[in-house]
Image (spheres, rainbow, N blue to C red):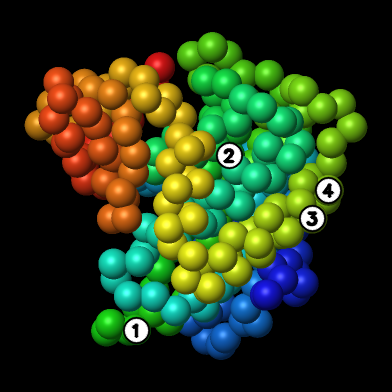
């Protein structure tokens, strides 16, 4: 098993831990599992170009460098494995009430607590490296109902990001090992079982309009599968987004 976080690069302030990792990898290799950990991240990246803000010194902003073996049909399985590692981290701390909102946000109740951004760099058909960025709200702060975010500190008084980081490294290592062993069915089934609003009526939107149906699963290509009046519809990742409750 590769132990993520055994090698740590600590930064006082950075625009983005993932950007920093990419810049370093442009010049030299890093040990697999290396974590880029920032005290302050001022331009954290989320899905679809969104920003991830943090409280300096309290919230967790980290990116991991990995060298998984994969082809272009396995990219979302890898994404699922990494998301499960973050899910297990939050579940370990908070218990029930944690879920995965497609494609890879971690919710507690109906509020977003963590986001994962997986960036892959290819050379032709060969994967050069993967950068797994994780933003996790740890600080004791409250959010507005409009913001609909959550934080570990709102529920656990004494939680520290150093402890959260240790748990995260163990959980990500576990699921990365499952991926490397080729346990794709187990990853898919576990991911599906932890989906936010699974077997409930949801709405997904794209530039072409809205689709309403019962959330069934997420397939191996990352498409959201809905039951729309008895017919299974696959909604491609990157085209559709799942609307809030």
Residue at 56% of width from left, 87% of height from top?
A: 28
State whether residue 152 is above or below residue 1. Answer: above
Q: Farthest residue toward the right? A: 158
Residue at 68% of width from left, 37% of height from top?
A: 91
Q: Quadrant of the C terminus?
A: top left
Q: CA distance from mark 4 to mark 2?
A: 16 Å
First-in-chain label (1 vs 2): 2
Front-most of residues 81 and 129: 81
Q: CA distance from mark 3 to mark 2?
A: 16 Å
Q: CA distance from mark 4 to mark 1?
A: 35 Å
Q: Residue 194: image x %, image y %?
A: 51, 37
Q: Which mark is residue 126?
A: 1
Q: Which mark is residue 166?
A: 3
Instruction: Say whether residue 199 is left or right of residue 42.
Output: left
State whether residue 153 is above or below residue 234. Answer: above
Residue at 14% of width from left, 20% of height from top?
A: 229
Which residue position is annotated with label 2?
114
Which residue position is annotated with label 4?
163
| SS assignment at label 2 | strand
Q: CA distance from mark 1 to mark 2?
A: 30 Å
Q: Which mark is residue 12?
A: none
Query: How many C-alpha atoms fall within 10 Å of the one at disc 2: few (<14), some, or many (≥20)?
Result: many
């Amino acid at each position: 098993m590769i132990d993520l976080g055994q090698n740590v690069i600590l930064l006082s302030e950075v625009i983005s831990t993932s950007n920093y990792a990419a810049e370093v990898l442009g010049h030299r290799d890093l040990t697999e599992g290396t974590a880029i950990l920032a005290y302050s991240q001022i331009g954290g990246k989320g899905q679809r170009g969104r920003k991830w803000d943090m409280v300096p010194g309290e919230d967790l902003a980290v990116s991991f460098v990995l060298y998984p073996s994969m082809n272009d049909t396995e990219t979302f399985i890898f994404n699922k494995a990494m998301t499960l590692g973050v899910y297990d981290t939050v579940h370990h701390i908070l218990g029930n009430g944690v879920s995965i909102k497609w494609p890879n946000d971690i919710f507690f109740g109906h509020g977003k607590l963590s986001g994962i951004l997986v960036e892959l760099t290819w050379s032709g058909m060969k994967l050069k490296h993967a950068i797994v960025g994780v933003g996790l709200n740890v600080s004791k702060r409250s959010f507005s109902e409009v913001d609909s975010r959550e934080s570990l500190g709102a529920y656990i008084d004494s939680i520290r990001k150093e402890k959260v980081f240790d748990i995260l490294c163990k959980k990500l290592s576990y699921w990365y090992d499952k991926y490397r062993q080729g346990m794709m069915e187990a990853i898919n089934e576990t991911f599906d079982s932890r989906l936010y609003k699974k077997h409930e009526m949801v709405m997904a939107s794209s530039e072409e309009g809205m689709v309403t149906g019962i959330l069934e699963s997420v397939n191996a290509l990352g498409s959201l599968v809905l039951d729309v009046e008895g017919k299974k519809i696959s909604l491609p990742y990157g085209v559709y987004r799942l609307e809030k409750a």
